[in-house]
Image (spheres, rainbow, N blue to C red):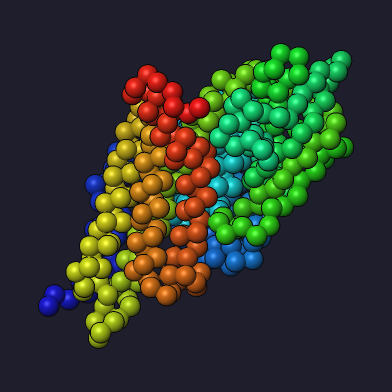
């Protein structure tokens, strides 16, 4: 019977990058990724399970995240979309909740400003956003509107002289309990088009209540938002956010980020399952000596690598300005389905220890459910892809 290697945690494939995709990055990007990886190991991993168990957000982490400067690596720092994707996967690998926090502030919120604001608005808002002196949230989903929100936005905006009056409700809004600003998408009562507004959370009529009793991404502070005659000055209406087609310009890019999260979550499952299989003894020997366990580990790795390969190519297409909505949709559907399979196998390898957060896998398993659902469900993204290959819409 073969035995484990002398140092099973220092092997060429221990990082899960089985086909060396990181070597496609520039030397500078590889160094930057290594710097972030060290930061995550030092500042995020040690606290992740504790804050998840308590359902609280580590506010002291925000200045540290600001210092390491993770916001807008592509538009602001000149990095590739491949680097940005691998970076997001790495943050997810450390803690999906912190990755979601960054995905909301950086991807959805900052992306809305970068994509849909005027230059004057960008000049006024982006410096504090990039420095994380102002934390943002993204208000699109509603209590009665999720996958159908494109045509079913109930939150309204009414022009009133030099201001807009917003009324309605939003749900599942990450960061909203402590954010400074929220980009709110509302339907203009005059032309029936969805438009975007930067809303200061201190304005009268704005309220946010934390959603309790979650089983996934418990560290993320999701909220129900109520807008009761909130008066927003005209300058805070995003100049280029005038239809849901404009909103989709943001979602197309952020959907890539969620697919990269699915990669990171699979690598997290691989990390925990692999270490457990080597360290845990059953029948007098490590679990890793059993063929079925090795098969399970390789299945997790294969899922992760196939997902990563798809995302590497999609990121290259995005860098070349060639990525299409349906490609992002397929990537989100495929990678999250592989993720669901991977985390279930990982939980199984840990047996009973896989259902307590002490070992990390229960948290990974539970967090995957949120990633599977947000930024377009697997079903909706499958139908977006199906429409592209058949020319026929089956969504409604």
- In the rendered image, the quadrant that contains the N terminus is bottom left
Rendered residue at 38%/71% (across/down)? 350
Q: Position of residue 357 (x, y in %)?
A: 51, 69
In depth, the one of 17 and 300 nearer the eye is 300
- How many marks are shown on the rendered structure? 0
Rendered residue at 72%/45% (across/down)? 224
- Residue 243, compared with residue 39, is above or below; it is above
- In the image, farthest residue toward the left: 1
Q: Position of residue 387 (x, y in %)?
A: 40, 24
Q: Position of residue 246 (x, y in %)?
A: 58, 21
In depth, the one of 377 and 223 nearer the eye is 377
Rendered residue at 53%/42% (across/down)? 374
Residue 60 can be seen, yes or no: no
Q: In the rendered image, which quarter is residue 85 located in?
A: top left
- Residue 278, compared with residue 68, is above or below; it is below
* In the displayed structure image, the side of residue 230 where residue 197 appears, left or right: left
Residue 304 can be seen, yes or no: yes
Rendered residue at 73%/20% (across/down)? 188
* In the displayed structure image, the side of residue 124 where residue 261 appears, left or right: left
Q: Position of residue 105 (x, y in %)?
A: 61, 40
- Residue 16, compared with residue 362, is above or below; it is above
In depth, the one of 83 and 176 nearer the eye is 176
In depth, the one of 297 and 345 nearer the eye is 345
Q: In the rendered image, which quarter is residue 234 located in?
A: top right
Q: In the rendered image, which quarter is residue 268 located in?
A: bottom left
């Amino acid at each position: 019977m073969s035995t484990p290697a002398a140092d099973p945690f220092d092997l060429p494939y221990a990082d899960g990058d089985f086909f060396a995709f990181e070597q496609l990055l520039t030397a500078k990007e590889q160094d930057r990724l290594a710097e972030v990886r060290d930061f995550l190991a030092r500042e995020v991993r040690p606290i992740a399970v504790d804050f998840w168990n308590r359902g609280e957000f580590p506010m002291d982490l925000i200045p540290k995240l600001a210092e390491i400067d993770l916001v807008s690596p592509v538009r602001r720092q000149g990095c590739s979309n491949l680097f940005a994707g691998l970076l997001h996967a790495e943050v997810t690998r450390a803690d999906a909740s912190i990755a979601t926090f960054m995905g909301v502030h950086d991807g959805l919120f900052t992306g809305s400003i970068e994509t849909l604001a005027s230059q004057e608005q960008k000049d006024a808002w982006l410096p504090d956003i990039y420095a994380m002196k102002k934390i943002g949230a993204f208000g699109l989903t509603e209590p009665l509107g999720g996958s159908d929100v494109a045509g079913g936005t109930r939150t309204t905006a009414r022009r009133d002289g030099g201001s807009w009056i917003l009324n309605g409700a939003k749900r599942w809004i990450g960061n909203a309990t402590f954010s400074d600003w929220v980009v709110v998408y509302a339907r203009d009562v005059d032309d029936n088009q969805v438009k975007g507004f930067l809303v200061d959370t201190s304005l009268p009529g704005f309220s946010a209540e934390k959603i309790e009793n979650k089983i996934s991404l418990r560290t993320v502070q999701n909220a129900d938002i109520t807008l009761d005659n909130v008066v927003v000055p005209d300058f805070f209406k995003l100049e280029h956010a005038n239809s849901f087609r404009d909103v989709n310009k943001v979602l197309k890019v952020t959907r890539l980020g969620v697919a990269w999260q699915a990669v990171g979550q699979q690598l997290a499952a691989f990390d925990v399952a692999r270490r457990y299989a080597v360290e845990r003894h059953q029948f007098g020997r490590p679990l890793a000596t059993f063929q079925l366990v090795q098969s399970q580990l390789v299945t997790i790795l294969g899922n992760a690598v196939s997902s990563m390969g798809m995302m590497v190519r999609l990121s290259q297409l995005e860098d070349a300005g060639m990525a299409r909505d349906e490609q992002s949709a397929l990537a989100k559907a495929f990678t999250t389905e592989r993720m669901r399979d991977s985390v279930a196998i990982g939980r199984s390898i840990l047996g009973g220890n896989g259902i307590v957060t002490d070992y990390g896998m229960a948290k990974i398993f539970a967090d995957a459910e949120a990633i599977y659902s947000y930024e377009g469900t697997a079903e909706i993204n499958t139908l977006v892809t199906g429409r592209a290959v058949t020319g026929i819409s089956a969504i409604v």
